[in-house]
Image: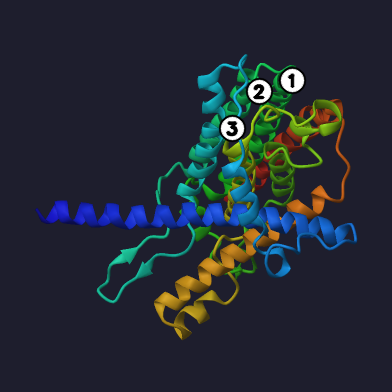
Amino acid sequence: MLLLEIDIAFLIEKLILASVILLGSLGVAMYATWGERKVAAVMQDRVGPNRAGPLGLLQPLADGGKLFFKEEIIPDSSTKFLFILGPGLAMLTACMTSAVIPWGPDYITESGHAVSLQVADINIGILFIFGVVSLGVYGVMLGGWASNNKFSLLSSIRAAAQSVSYELAMGISLVALLMMTGSLSMREIVGQQHGFWADGYFTWNFFKQPLGFLIFLVCSFAELNRAPFDMAECESELNMGYHQEYSSMKLGFYLFAEYINMFITSAVIATLYFGGYNFPFMDAVAEAVNPLLYTIICVLVLLTKVICIILFFMFVRWTLPRFRYDQLMRLGWRSLIPLALINMLITGAVILWALN
């Protein structure tokens, strides 16, 4: 009976955490659209959204309401079940990846109970993320194919080829990081980056794997279909791309999935390469404040890193022109994959030399 009560309490705790992360992801995605438009306005010397609420802060709510009440259109020639499944699958996979990210250290209550800020502490967290991300492209493929629109189909084929090409380089770049950490667990990787400086060197993996980080970052742009790698949505060639036939909240799901993916990708980059919730002098802070405040500070540190990476994604979008498709594929196959392999070999050689 006691075991059953413990299991129920554990499930309730995880359900609350998952709900907070899900609602937080939706909130960040919603206001990332506002942030994107504000960043674009600053870089183009204009004002941006400023009508709905102070500084246009209610603009995402207005846009969301508009999508809810728009007429829903399903083309007669479409494959209706797959047409509906596409945006649902894209949204589902976007929300699933947040489950293995440690958003902060365990909070120890006064009774000694440890509250984990990670929904699922599995020892293959990185493989889980790669598996879910690989499934995400099916949402794009289904949407493009089921629309029975040639522009949408061409867009989905481009997205699939781009995803496969850059996942290879991304995976190989991570192999070098995993060789150093010796673990696939996201929490263990964060734990190894404790603080900022230890044993005469930086603890964050960015300083240990700068080339691997650069490759991972470039591949993230391609995986997210963000400019300058937005080949799947290039208006000059394919109109709107794979979601051209979508309207109402089906279109909203695709747009939200893109921004949720950007938020989660930024969290993964911060976790793998920038210490996650770790920060300089965190041990001194832990001794100076109570456990709850310390946990909140760690969560805010991670979110600050995530917001900075999201802003970087936005700055790049409004700075660099779009690649041609042949340039995109050439960069992936002829540059990034060889560089990732060289980085992996160099990392292996350095580890072997250090062990000897």
Check if mark 1's residue and mark 2's residue have beta carbons within 8 Å.
Answer: yes
Q: On the image, which quarter does residue 155 sit in?
A: top right
Q: Is residue 202 left or right of residue 187?
A: right
Mark 3 or mark 2, whichever is nearer to me: 3
The quadrant holding residue 277 is bottom right
Q: Position of residue 140 (x, y in %)?
A: 63, 28
| Chosen colour scheme | rainbow
* Residue 265 visible in the current orientation: no
Q: Is residue 75 above or below residue 304?
A: above
Residue 247 x/y as whole percent: 64, 34
Tell me residue 274's x, y (percent): 63, 59
Tell me what residue is drawn at x 49 percent, y 46 percent: 183
Answer whether labels 3 and 2 touch (C-beta < 8 Å).
Answer: no
Q: Which residue position holds label 1? A: 154
Query: Mark 1, residues whose alpha carbon is within 10 Å: few (<14), some, or many (≥20)?
Result: some
Q: Residue at x 35, y 52 (%)?
A: 15
Task: Out of 210 and 152, give the one closest to the viewer.
Answer: 152
Task: Please name the amino acid that badge 1 sits on.
Answer: Leu
Tell me the residue at 67%/25% (across/down).
Answer: 160
The residue beneath circle 3 is 72
Above or below residue 151? Residue 285 is: below
Q: CA distance from mark 3 to mark 2?
A: 17 Å
Residue 144: assigned label: 2
Q: Secondary structure at mark 2?
A: helix
Label 1, label 2: how far apart the Cα atoms are: 8 Å
Task: Give the amino acid at mark 2.
Answer: Gly
